[in-house]
Amino acid sequence: MTKKIKQMSIYSFCITFAIFIVISHFANYAPGLKAGKAFWDSVKEMALILPCAFALIALCEVWVKRETIEYHLGHDAGIKKYFWAILMGGMTIGGMYLAFPVAYTLFKKGASLKVIFSFLGFAGFCRIPMTIFEITCLGWKFTLIRIVTGGTFIIAYSCIMGGILHKQGYQIKE
Amino acid sequence: MTWLLWLITIIALIASQLKDPKKTKKILYLSGKRLISILPLFLFAMIGYALIIGFTETSTIQKIMGHTFTMGHTLMATLIGSIALLPGFIAFPLCALLQKQGVAYGILAAFSISLMNVGIATFPIEVKYLGFKVSLIRNILGLLMASVCGLIMAFFMGELL
């Protein structure tokens, strides 16, 4: 599928959705009203976060030296680099959409693929505000077990995937 | 909290502008370009999320996910989690509600893990950056992880029959 066709289909999907919401509004169709409100709330929230997030990512990309990243997160950085991966994953804001540009920046600056995959795994897994919320909702025992088991799994498969892909000369794209 | 984010961003940008205007111009250009390129995929994800919120009720989810812990229910929860598009702030109260209504912890673990890691909605963006093969593998591993962690959770919570 060419890029143009993909873009056209997504935009037509959006327009269809918009029409659906407008009609639901006038017809008082409950699911449509709920969907419209949910859409508006989430867009509002993300619209405030996205520009800042991209600006901060670009700032880091332009200002942080390659050597710094390579030293802390590169291939020879030692066990410590996984702690960085967990920390950065925990501090991800705004969802997985933002973790991927960060991953690309890390890759461009020389971080090891194992670290990048661990980071992506943790970004979906133990974001700090979410985790605090989880403890309040489901208890610290649940959260602890989830993080320990999931975390081990994430690091394990990231190491394997990172190692294999690195040998194949894999690149993260823009 | 978002005002703090804006404050940090603006201060950082001003500092960058003072130190090197050329670099700052590049920063603004890069972030603008990326914002625009991600916009369609992002809208797609938001719409999917809104539709799910609009068309599902808690009771439906609970009926599907079942009470006692079985592998079947876990797999079902994992699959639903991968399709569902809920931010954490909605997902966790939902899980708490389900738990009070008797859904096993193990099932909820599988559900929340696959919810946050695997996603039909995040897949297009993932493919854009990581390529199709890698994204597929990552997501399949995520499903596996969700099921296995569900199992382990159930074991530790004493739910394994």
Image: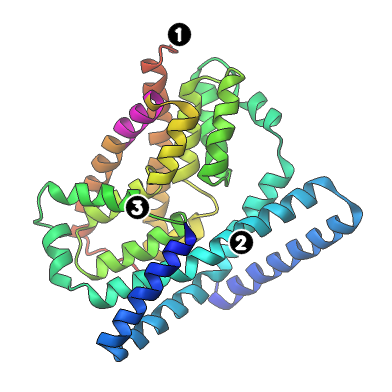
Instruction: Give the number of the disc on residue B113.
Output: none
The amino acid marked with disc number 1 is Leu
Q: Residue furthest right?
A: A27
Reading the image, the residue beneath label 2 is A43
Q: Chain of mark 1?
A: B
Residue at 64% in and 56% down: A41
Residue at 24% in and 76% down: A63
Reading the image, the residue beneath label 1 is B161
Q: Secondary structure at mark 1?
A: loop
Observer-nearest of A43 and B43: A43
Residue at 20% in and 48% down: A82
Reading the image, the residue beneath label 3 is A91
Q: CA distance from mark 2 to mark 3?
A: 21 Å
Observer-nearest of A119 and A2: A119
Q: Name the side, left or right, on which B141 lies relative to A78.
A: right
Q: Chain of mark 2?
A: A
Q: CA distance from mark 2 to mark 1?
A: 44 Å
Q: Secondary structure at mark 3?
A: loop
N-terminal of the pair, mark 2 or mark 3, is: 2
Q: Position of residue B14 (x, y in %)?
A: 35, 81
The answer to whether residue A44 of the structure is visible from this angle is yes
| Crowding near the residue tagged with mark 3, few <14, some 14–19, many ≥20 C-alpha atoms within 10 Å | some
